[in-house]
Image (spheres, grey):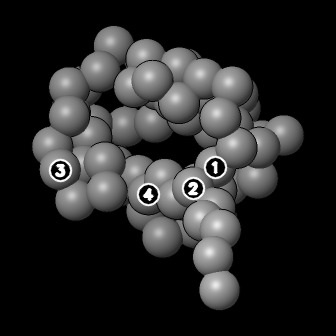
Amino acid sequence: MTLLLNGASRDVAARTLAEALDELGYAGKIVATAVNGAFVPARRRAECNLSDGDRIEVVAPMQGG
C-alpha cells in the first residue's frame, strides 16, 4: 500500500503502524507517531491498522537549547 510518510509517498507491505515503522527503519528508535493527524502512543501501534493513502507522521525528539 502507499502511505504518505512525513509528506513523502512511500510503498510498504505493512498492515499496522508497528509493522510500518519496522519496515521503514524506525525499529527500536524513540519516536512520536500520528496517523491522519491523530496521535498514536507506542503501546497502541501494533493495533493501529493502516489503509492505503494514510498520512503518517514520525517525529524524533531533539536535544538542544
The quarter holding residue 63 reads bottom right
Q: Which mark is residue 8?
A: 3
**Residue drawn 65% across and 35% down?**
29
Query: Which tag, 3 or 1, sits closer to the chain's start?
Result: 3
Q: Which residue is mark 2?
A: 60
* Distance in Å between CA atoms under marks 1 and 4: 10 Å
**Residue drawn 29% across and 21% down?**
12
SS category of the residue bearing label 2? loop
Of residues 42 and 48, which is closer to you in this image? 42
Question: Around disc 3, counting alpha carbons within 10 Å, would you say few (fewer than 14), some (14 to 19), or many (20 or more)?
Answer: few
Query: Which tag, 3 or 2, sits closer to the chain's start?
Result: 3
Quadrant holding the C terminus = bottom right
Question: Around disc 4, counting alpha carbons within 10 Å, would you say few (fewer than 14), some (14 to 19), or many (20 or more)?
Answer: some
Q: Are circles 2 and 1 on residues that touch, CB within 8 Å?
A: yes
Question: Around disc 1, counting alpha carbons within 10 Å, would you say few (fewer than 14), some (14 to 19), or many (20 or more)?
Answer: some
Of residues 15 and 60, which is closer to you in this image? 60
Q: Is residue 2 left or right of residue 32?
A: left
Vertical relation: 57 (above or below) 49: below
Q: Residue furthest left?
A: 9
Q: Which mark is residue 31?
A: 1
Residue type for callout 1 = Val
Q: Is residue 21 left or right of residue 24?
A: right
Vertical relation: 59 (above or below) 23: below
* Distance in Å between CA atoms under marks 3 and 2: 17 Å
* Distance in Å between CA atoms under marks 3 and 1: 18 Å
**Residue drawn 33% across and 13% down?**
13
Residue 15 in sight: no
Q: Are circles 4 and 3 on residues that touch, CB within 8 Å?
A: no
Q: Which residue is mark 4?
A: 57
Residue type for callout 4 = Glu
